[in-house]
Amino acid sequence: MYNYSQISHVHFEPTQRCQAACPMCDRTNNSHIKNAEISINQFKQIINSDFVKQLRSFLMCGNHGDPMIAKDTLEMYKWLRYNNEKLHLQMTTNGGGRSDDWWKSLAEIFGEHGKVSFSVDGLEDTNHLYRVNVDWKRVENSMDVFTQAGGKGVWVFLIFEHNEHQVEEAERMAKLFGLEFVRKKSGRWVQSYKNKKVDKKITIKGKEIKPPTEPKHQNKSVNRYDKLIKSHGTFQEYLDKTKIKCKSIDTKEIYISAEGLVTPCCWTAGNLYKVYEKIGQNQIWSYIDDVKNINVLYKPLNEIIEGNFFKKIEQSWNLSSCTQGKSKVCAEKCGTGFDAFGDQWK
């Protein structure tokens, strides 16, 4: 797939903790998530100074947690900046926490080579409908303090039926904060475990979340889903036949979870702990001989990247079908005929 010396981008999850309960998040109501977190001492061993120097960018986000919540996030960023002054630092967060001093420190560490993505899906009367348990006043304050301290950021607005009327107003507000503004068109209306398209999600508070009604706010791949099914018969048939063009190979990226698990991307890691499956049931486990062999707290990072797990995933792409071992998650996310992820930004 690639070797250790080629890695230039890291997607890192410092914690599985989060105060939110977003209905499309794998963390919500997931009994497999145990709130794991990487300490600063572990981080320095995992991401040693020599490795930091070879990197071009470092993103803290993750599948289950919010980096803002992690105890040692600032110390981790300080370590990265100390060892690579030009490393592009990134963080994705709901923004609903931390003190003013914390956000000022983050802005100082990031400097000219960094950006925070604030995932804010509406205004005061709507953001909480999807970002359940996230306090608007704290979000607003975080964005304001961070940018006033010189931080560079972007407001990423996930569009739904209940907030699509506020997109333009939010964009104007972002400009007042000094933030870029991005309209995000979710591709999660196609559910991989059911291989079908859905038209709503239910929050933990019993409210319905629906996709946007205006075509300009809709994900093009999701809208092409019916045509894809007509062409292939079923979504599974498409997954069996599609060629795979791995996004992580293109970007020379790896993903490290808050448990220390190392995978090519967040999607492969995310399939380890699906709320609707028992641990070990998902296909991705079939490529793992021993979970400690992909855990950087037990095995050196270079050995994991160049080890059997990464090789087995790549080798699976040439198999005839997913039932024969072709990676289903790779076909879903990096198949050449359906890219709901990429179309989120178009």
Image: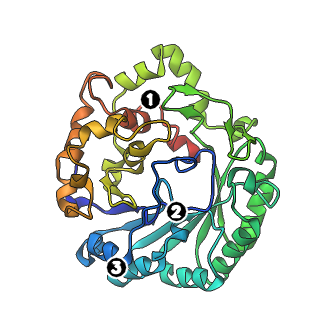
State if disc 2 and disc 1 touch (CB < 8 Å).
no
Viewer-side residue, 101 vs 107: 101
Q: CA distance from mark 1 to mark 2?
A: 35 Å
Q: On the image, numbered disc 2 is attached to which residue? A: 17
Whether residue 5 appears in this view of the structure is no
Q: CA distance from mark 3 to mark 2?
A: 28 Å
State if disc 2 and disc 3 touch (CB < 8 Å).
no
Tell me which numbered mark, 1 or 2, is placed earlier along the sequence: 2
Name the residue type under label 3: Asn
For image coordinates 50% across by 48% down, the residue present is 31
Would residue 294 be found to the left or right of residue 169 on screen?
Answer: left
Name the residue type under label 1: Gly
Tell me which numbered mark, 1 or 3, is placed earlier along the sequence: 3
- Classify mark 2: helix, strand or loop: loop
Viewer-side residue, 61 vs 296: 296
Point out which mark residue 346 bears.
Answer: none
Tell me which numbered mark, 3 or 2, is placed earlier along the sequence: 2
Point out which mark residue 337 bears.
Answer: 1
In this picture, is 200 found above or below 250? above
In this picture, is 245 found above or below 6? above
Name the residue type under label 2: Arg
Q: How crowded is the residue under tag 2: few (<14 C-alpha within 10 Å), some, or many (20+)?
A: many
Would residue 247 be found to the left or right of residue 63 on screen?
Answer: left
For image coordinates 50% across by 41% down, the residue present is 275
Q: Whole-percent x and y of residue 118?
A: 62, 64
Q: Whole-percent x and y of residue 139?
A: 70, 68
Q: How crowded is the residue under tag 1: few (<14 C-alpha within 10 Å), some, or many (20+)?
A: some
Q: Whole-percent x and y of residue 215?
A: 71, 35
Viewer-side residue, 124 vs 297: 297
Between disc 3 and disc 2, the foreground one is: 2
For residue 186, what is the image quadrant? top right
Q: On the image, numbered disc 3 is attached to which residue? A: 84
